[in-house]
Amino acid sequence: MTTQKTRILPDSDLVALRDLAAQLRVDSIRASGAAGSGHPTSSLSAADLLAVLLARHLRYDWSDPKAPTNDHLIFSKGHASPLLYAVFKAAGVISDDELVGTYRKFGSRLQGHPTPALPWVDVATGSLGQGLPAGVGIALAGRYLDKLPYHVWVLCGDSETAEGSIWEALDKAGHYGLRNLTAIVDVNRYGQRGTTELEWDLDTYRRRVEAFGCRAMVVDGHDLTSIDDALRTARTATGPTVLLARTIKGRGVPDVEDKPGWHGKALPADIADRAVTALGGVRSITVAAPMPAPGQPAVPTPAPGPAPDLPRYERGAKVATRKAYGEALLALAARPDVVVLDGEVSDSTRTEAFADAFPDRFFEIYIAEQQLVGAAVGLQVRGYRPFAATFAAFLSRAYDFIRMAGISGAAIKLAGSHAGVEIGADGPSQMALEDLAAMRAVYGSTVLYPSDAVSCAALVAQTLDLSGVSYVRTTRGSYPVLYDNGDTFPIGGSRQLRGGPGDRVALIGAGVTVHNCLAAADRLAADGIDARVIDLYSVKPVDRDALVEAVRITGGRLVVVEDHYPQGGIGAAVLEALADLGEPVRMSHLAVRGLPTSGTTAQLMDAAGIGVDAIMGAARTLAAR
Amino acid sequence: MTTQKTRILPDSDLVALRDLAAQLRVDSIRASGAAGSGHPTSSLSAADLLAVLLARHLRYDWSDPKAPTNDHLIFSKGHASPLLYAVFKAAGVISDDELVGTYRKFGSRLQGHPTPALPWVDVATGSLGQGLPAGVGIALAGRYLDKLPYHVWVLCGDSETAEGSIWEALDKAGHYGLRNLTAIVDVNRYGQRGTTELEWDLDTYRRRVEAFGCRAMVVDGHDLTSIDDALRTARTATGPTVLLARTIKGRGVPDVEDKPGWHGKALPADIADRAVTALGGVRSITVAAPMPAPGQPAVPTPAPGPAPDLPRYERGAKVATRKAYGEALLALAARPDVVVLDGEVSDSTRTEAFADAFPDRFFEIYIAEQQLVGAAVGLQVRGYRPFAATFAAFLSRAYDFIRMAGISGAAIKLAGSHAGVEIGADGPSQMALEDLAAMRAVYGSTVLYPSDAVSCAALVAQTLDLSGVSYVRTTRGSYPVLYDNGDTFPIGGSRQLRGGPGDRVALIGAGVTVHNCLAAADRLAADGIDARVIDLYSVKPVDRDALVEAVRITGGRLVVVEDHYPQGGIGAAVLEALADLGEPVRMSHLAVRGLPTSGTTAQLMDAAGIGVDAIMGAARTLAAR
């Protein structure tokens, strides 16, 4: 745009700041009004905060949103999107027509809640309590990896402080001394359906924030000078800061100010018109915002190089895939953008070798899985390749974060160890038995479940440059290496381990059950029943061609075996791939149907009906049909 | 058992308490040693705390674990199960043989982490940070419903205070003034792979706890007298209390005391033998624990009565299923054990009518979905029927809690509103599109997705006495009532809305897509293509008979339409049910394959390919094959 830009810098220039704040209010009202929905009152309460931040503290080259030195602005209260988009108009990067004409409409990038469809949006928000954890990840990158002086500003709602994830985030901000992070809490004392738990009890907020290791600053969120002072202090603080801004919901529109019942509603035309007039009408201020100082990240951009020197394993040797995962991470460390995070179980997930060798690129998140994933999402905003690991069962703790990572298109690499009944004596609380279903259903996800060390290392290496959420399920116990070093395992592929054109049945497994399938096939062969064995290591996307061939060769006789509950896992992946085939399929689906207990691996697999005997029985029954 | 019971009551009787603590230590060492796995050092740190609690403060009739007046004891640090089971031996309810002979073995109820397979265990633990939120639910029942003086004691680990859910729980404990709740934090400064974030910084713990509205008491966790004083104070406090106990991991076994590297490992035989001897050898103290005073809950046990007087709807009238959900809850309120919880969106989920009419049985949990589900789990421990609602998308925040509720066998009733792209302009962060996959994969779950108000109310009523986790997915918009009042909708059933023996294709939907299927069928009929329409309102369990009949009538021509991502949802449910049928199926699977944006319901459904035109197109293609 060619509009003259207004630079609002002198300390005394409050009039210009007031005008800017009025414009943000007017535009928030107009955008949501034109859409007929949205959250104008939640935008109005924070307009003064954003006016000061945009005009005077957010160092951002609006012509180059990918500039490494840019500050970061996250609306953790994503429903205040009218305000965010009004800020973008004031920054000169979207037009008034786009703002008022397309907000919340089909085909617009100005969606109801912000997503990275907009180049100035780092992460999708709208599920409360997630923007701040992502901001922690960006701030970790800034302080420990990029070593650039950019600042991360996160606008939070007061309602979302009821989410435990906010406290996981502040705790980690304090622990890692993230002086480059500022949360601005818009304490307007109203949630969706009424007042918040703490209303305007700023003192309790302050004590909580301080106890969690951050500096709290209580300000009147409508006093421009106070806001300005606080933001300046935040930028130069020695640790993470939280601005607790006492605000009024609907501020600037007397008809709705501090009144219940106005959350998430466009203002009626009469109220909106009066307010716009009183606020000075439509403006077109474009702010010349502060620019970042030039700089480059301390971590070099990875140059195209030779393929990673993956660990090698001897065929037949017993190696746990979680061990291969850890060793693959070590090999990938040659890439300077690889970073690893763990939820305080690195001795189990086997990320500890990376942690020991590359402590500067390892982040211990302790037992806070939401923040674990949130930090990974933030790190990939800055171009890093975050590998985050914990027990597979405990990734369920972060499922909303993983869901939102899918919406963000965030390239994060998750690993879950200790999957299934295979883990044995620890019992069902530690057994991931629903993770494949949950992870498959994440938008844009890749789900991998290697059976041996060679394939595990090869698959982990391929996730390095993969877009979206990828998930590798690893196994606790040690099982024989099945493949040769250098064998390839394309994502979306599979491996046929036994079989030929005379196969009467196909045994399909992934991960640990592949070994049971192999044992069953060998015993079936001794009985004269030829069985194909497919290692379906790529659960999503799945190798439809191999499955169709198996159906055609065997007359549709499939035994699918999974260490997972029967719903939504490998069986479902097979069936979904074959759904429109139109040929008869007789699939015997062996999965964990009862609630497991403690026991040995063999006892629990047999009890669940996914052991060798069960596979043989199912295969014989099918072959006889 | 017939052993003589030891009553340890006089304040001066420290010797007996010390002996009891030594027994708990010895038994923790022996049980894990015999199992060859487990967490003895995490048990040793808390043995003194539990000795004093068991002998002097836990008012519990061990002969009647269901007694309404019993205190509750939850090991939120479930990995300290050796200690918990040693407590059970000391209480006289399990034998030494069972403890040492069966712990962690297949078939034993003494599993690696506690589950309600044991009558003295309220909830399964082992995923950290969940025992305390469940304890909050029990304490809510005690204070506000039962109105009985039982106390809820929760043993927490220090590592798990990194979980946000702990702070959601303490916040709610403070908000609801749960003076009947005490968390005992075993601050042994070690996690699994090293020291904790805060180590022995008891002052920071104290400030956090106090800021979250609870009374903190810092004690030496090995000083029996201090523990005793603190527990007595806790019982009579005016609000929730947190004992911050400074302890030593491995206490009592000098070889491992306060040393890293001993988490989750049975002690080697030589160390164990020395320790057992030093601790005085094997004892068989059975404690005569304090008994609760007699009493009865203030809420009467519901008597068998007439079926609930469900809301009635006029066929063809447009009513949102979320509205019917709220009205069904009102009808169910005739049952005194029905309680409702919401995550601060009761105006959206439509639980607000219940909240207004029965404020004493409604719990506002604010935006803390983990605590929302945790509270429901706790309330059902005391026999209540908790209905917990939020946006379907945000139940993903509590997925680990729902997973664990499945393991607990907890009878909780979840409702998720605003499912799918149907919601329109708010965008993907608010759209549940993976919930059916995730919820189907929960052990023992029931998943329901009604298409109209009549069926919604009927299904919600049936969840009342259902065991396990049930989930009802409701819709934001208003759609025509399809059924007559009084029609029945058995769980595991379906409804055929169009069709006959000449059907050439079956259109299978659930919830909102049923309406699209009906419109498509009517237009297909005008073109001479008879289409069966099945309302698959029961997604789990699914009506296999109806699906098989549809396959046989149509020659396997199925169009499955769902407002959900393609993985693991209704399509998978259909396919899993037909997996072993052995007849050709040509299923056209219409689901949300791209990332949705904002827009109107019709625009988004059409863009996703789940609208009427897409259904007609798929049906025509199939019919022509």
Image (cartoon, coloured by chain):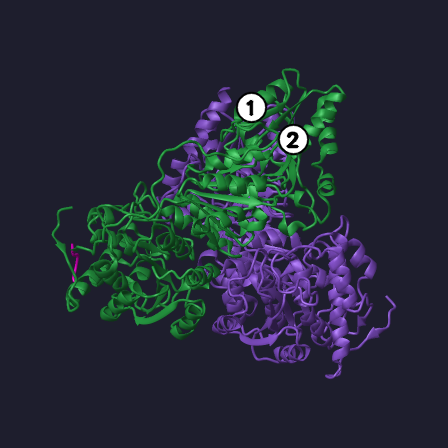
Chain colours: A green, B purple
Q: Give the residue pinned by disc 2.
A: A316
**Real-space Cα distance between discs 1 and 2?**
25 Å
Most frequent secondary structure within the magenta stretch: loop
Residue extent of the magenta highlight: A278-285
Residue A239, image x, y percentages: 37, 64
Residue at label 1?
Answer: A546
Magenta residue check for A283: yes
In what quadrant of the picture does the C terminus of chain A appear?
A: top right
Q: Is residue A249 magenta?
A: no
Q: Is residue B360 left or right of residue B41?
A: left
**Is label 1 in contact with label 2 (beta carbons under 8 Å)?**
no
Question: Looking at the picture, how far across and down is residue A570, in whole percent?
Answer: 59, 35
Query: Is label 1 on the same chain as label 2?
Result: yes
Please state if A583 lies on the left or on the right of A426 as rendered: left
Q: Nearer the viewer, residue B455 or B578?
A: B578
Q: Is residue B418 above or below residue B65?
A: above
